[in-house]
Image (tube, grey):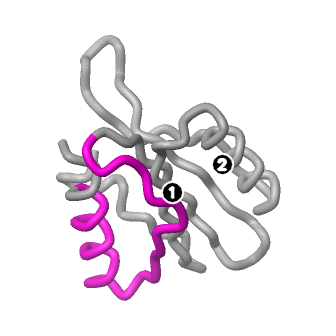
Amino acid sequence: MVSSFWVQAYLTRLRLREIPAFVTAHGDDTAGAVLIKLNTLDGQARLFQRGFDLTSGARRWVELSQGVEAEVDAAIARQRGFDPDIWVIEVEDRQGRHLLDEDGLS
């Protein structure tokens, strides 16, 4: 799937649920990986990246980091150091909603 298309569809889905989200790093439009930072606005955050289940081949979202927001930001910086084509989307929701478990977003 083209990364920019997926990002726009995800942002639209969040907007329809009135969940604020922002692109904080614009990656490669066609093949950039996507990181999702969930900021719960209490100093805590979680970081997700899409991965593959090696046994089934299914795509799923994997939590890369969780904890103090500054530590999650450091994890993002490390990932971007390895791959400058990565997209980073920051979702801000006190309830912890990210919608990544919904159909069509894996």
Q: Nearer the viewer, residue 30 or 53?
A: 30
Residue at (42% x, 48% y) in the render: 34
Residue at (51% x, 57% y) in the render: 88
Q: Looking at the figure, which quarter contains the C terminus?
A: top left
Q: Which numbered dot is residue 76?
A: 2
Residue 53 in the image: state x and y as whole percent: 35, 22
Q: Nearer the viewer, residue 63 or 2?
A: 2
Question: Tag 2: residue type?
Answer: Ile
Residue at (56% x, 59% y) in the render: 37
Residue annotated with mark 1? 88
Residue 104 placement, left or right of 83:
left
Residue at the top extreme? 55
Contact between labelled residues 2 and 1, with CB atoms less than 8 Å apart: yes
Residue 53 placement, left or right of 12:
right
Q: Which residues are magenta?
A: 6-30
Residue 55, by quadrant, is top left
Residue at (26% x, 52% y) in the render: 105
